Image (cartoon, helix red, strand yellow):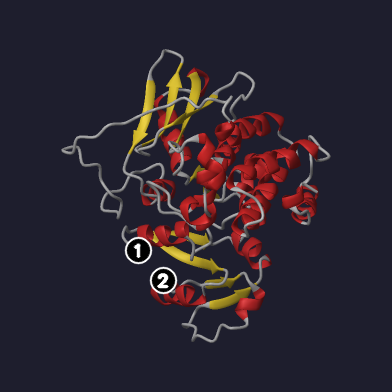
């Protein structure tokens, strides 16, 4: 039985992870964490009977009044995540907390030499150099959960690393790929939350609409696969159907792609069972009896609608503190859009301003990155201050 700590159990990835481990044999959930959704966390606790239940929101934790099964301990606060990530019993840490909040527990798991099923892309966007260094020193193995990075991870096994020509990261294009440029300024929050192919949380869905989610994935891919961003070894293609999750091209011209219906449970299952493949899981299957068309478009980087991708590539090349600033500024800009303070087409320009104007440092410590993140979040993105 492989023993799992699932951080972010009540989120979209967390729920899908429990769908997987509740369907296939060989896993025991040792720990689950949740933030504010206490009723769902209680249901998960009662079903999986973990040793630890972590309530990361200390204020919400005061409302916990549910009976706790024998053998289960309630832990409160973010610090509990880093402590449990390092517990000797824990073999796999599923890093599924959304946003910067997942950084410290991912760092702790890397330092402790765990297998990390990584869904929290921000850990690498902010602290990629640090996480990768710790993983190398401890022997930790990072297996990606994002569908695109899982596809790359799988496709790379078709050849040797030195045979790689380039990675082709696919993007759905979001709900506004075919919307005329002049109409982007009028996009509403409700429209931005309607993704054409994926069912995700609100933040990730909005990031997909701006293409900033793909910018974050560009930076994540750089660190996951040690890509040379100057050559470059990474390219982005728009693929609206979201069936080809990404591709790898080798130096002989062969292109290896991973295809499946848009369902996060497959990359989650792959991350948990690697290097084996296990049948009988809850994942959807491709219906090859149905006629279908797969489209691919190269982004026009002279068009402002693709500026998020351009900024992601620039940030990945630059490294240092740029990723931390991009991530924090993106959170601020999305919040400002939701509050009605800025238009949809102003989100990425405000982010670019923050990235370009900050006091860049090429080799920051973890403490400096956390401090910088807090500093950026004190700004008001609406006024570019």
Which comes before the other along the chain, label 1 or label 2? 1
Marker disc for residue 22:
1
Foreground residue, 371 or 282? 371
Marker disc for residue 48:
2
**Residue drawn where x is 45% and y is 38% of the image:** 179
- In this view, the residue farthest toward the right is 359
- In this view, the residue farthest toward the left is 289
Foreground residue, 296 or 21? 296
**Residue drawn where x is 57% and y is 42% of the image:** 212
Foreground residue, 230 or 339? 339
Q: Residue 317 is drawn in which quadrant?
A: top right
Q: CA distance from mark 1 to mark 2?
A: 8 Å
Residue 197 location (% of width, % of height) = 37, 46
Per the image, label 1 sits on a secondary structure element best described as loop
Callout 1–callout 2 Cβ contact below 8 Å = yes
Residue 313 visible in image: yes
**Residue drawn where x is 62% and y is 53% of the image:** 337
- In this view, the residue farthest toward the top is 252
What is the crowding at mark 2: few (fewer than 14 residues within 10 Å), some, or many (at least 20)? some
Left or right: 162 as drawn, with respect to 254: right
Q: Residue 49 is drawn in which quadrant?
A: bottom left
Residue 24 location (% of width, % of height) = 32, 57
Residue 66 location (% of width, % of height) = 50, 85
Residue 94 visible in image: no
The N terminus lies in quadrant = bottom left
Per the image, label 2 sits on a secondary structure element best described as helix
Compared with 241, 191 (above or below) is below
Left or right: 171 as drawn, with respect to 21: right
Residue 357 location (% of width, % of height) = 80, 38
């Amino acid at each position: 039985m492989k023993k799992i700590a699932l951080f972010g159990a009540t989120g979209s990835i967390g729920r899908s992870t429990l769908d997987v481990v509740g369907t296939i044999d060989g896993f025991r959930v040792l720990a689950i964490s949740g933030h504010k959704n206490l009723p769902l966390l209680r249901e998960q606790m009662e079903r999986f009977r973990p040793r630890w239940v972590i309530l990361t929101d200390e204020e919400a934790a005061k409302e916990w009044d549910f009976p706790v099964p024998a053998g289960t301990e309630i832990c409160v606060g973010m610090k509990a995540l880093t402590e449990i990530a390092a517990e000797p019993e824990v073999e796999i840490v599923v890093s599924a907390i959304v946003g910067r909040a997942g950084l410290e527990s991912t760092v702790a798991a890397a330092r402790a030499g765990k297998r990390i099923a990584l869904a929290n892309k921000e850990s690498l966007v902010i602290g990629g150099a640090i996480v990768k260094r710790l993983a190398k020193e401890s022997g930790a193995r990072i297996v990606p959960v994002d569908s695109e990075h899982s596809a790359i991870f799988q496709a790379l096994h078709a050849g040797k690393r030195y045979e790689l020509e380039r990675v082709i990261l696919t993007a759905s294009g979001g709900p506004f790929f075919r919307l005329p440029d002049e109409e982007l300024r009028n996009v509403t929050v409700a429209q931005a939350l309607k993704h054409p192919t994926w069912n995700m949380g609100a933040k990730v869905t909005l990031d997909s609409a701006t293409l900033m989610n793909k910018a974050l994935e560009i930076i994540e891919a750089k660190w996951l696969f040690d890509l040379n961003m100057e050559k470059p070894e990474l390219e982005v293609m728009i693929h609206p159907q979201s069936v080809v999750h990404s591709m790898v091209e080798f130096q002989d011209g062969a292109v290896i792609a991973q295809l499946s219906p848009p369902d996060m449970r497959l990359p989650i299952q792959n991350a948990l069972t690697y290097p084996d493949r296990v049948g009988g899981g809850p994942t959807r299957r491709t219906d090859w009896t149905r006629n279908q068309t797969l489209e691919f478009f190269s982004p026009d980087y002279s068009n402002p609608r693709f500026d998020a991708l351009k900024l992601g590539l620039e940030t990945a090349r630059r490294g240092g503190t740029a990723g931390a600033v991009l991530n924090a500024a993106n959170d601020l800009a999305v919040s400002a859009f939701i509050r009605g303070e800025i238009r949809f087409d102003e989100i990425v320009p405000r982010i670019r301003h923050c990235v370009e104007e900050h006091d860049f440092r090429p080799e920051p410590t973890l403490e400096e990155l956390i401090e910088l993140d807090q500093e950026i979040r004190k700004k008001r993105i609406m006024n570019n201050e």
